Amino acid sequence: MKRNPHFLVHISGNQTIVVPSADAGFSGVVKGNETLGTILKLLDKDTTEEEIINTMKAEYDAPSGQIEKDVHNVIERLRKIGAIDG
């Protein structure tokens, strides 16, 4: 899976904003935290949910189950708005 290029990402400090282009098929703005930004950066290249989880576990000091749950929830929400291809 990979981020749909019709969704533009802006990361400023610990805030992440996702804005769809006219061709995205979604209207609105998605706001999130540093976790969303990290996941979106990892989605710049073709990857899997498992690879994202492993990278997040290495980067963040959080319980493994919480990381898995958070990554899964973010990916499902991004899929729902069409921000992920594949």
Image (cartoon, helix red, strand yellow):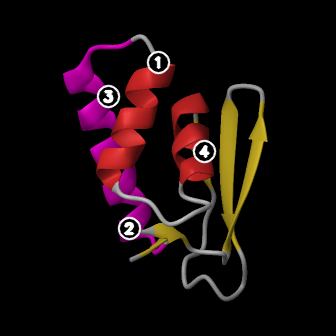
Q: Is residue 7 left or right of residue 63?
A: right
Span colored in magenta: 62-82
Alpha-carbon span between mark 4 and mark 3: 19 Å
Q: Residue furthest top?
A: 61
Query: Residue 69, how many percent across, how many down?
Result: 24, 35
- 2 or 3: tag closer to the N-terminus: 3
- Of the 4 image quadrants, the one containing the C terminus is bottom left
Disc 1: which residue: 60
Disc 2: which residue: 79
Give neighbour class at mark 4: few <14, some 14-19, many 20+ (Cα, 10 Å).
some
Q: Amino acid at mark 1?
A: Tyr
Disc 3: which residue: 67
Q: Which of labels 2 and 1 is toward the front? A: 1
Given residues 43 and 37, the one toward you in this image is 43
Q: Amino acid at mark 4?
A: Lys
Magenta segment, principal secondary structure? helix
- 4 or 2: tag closer to the N-terminus: 4
Please, is residue 61 above or below residue 50 in the view?
A: above
Q: Residue at x 75, y 41 (%)?
A: 11
Q: Secondary structure at mark 2?
A: helix
Residue 22 in view in this figure: yes
Q: Which of labels 4 and 3 is toward the front? A: 3
Q: Residue at x 61, y 82 (%)?
A: 24
Alpha-carbon span between mark 2 and mark 3: 18 Å
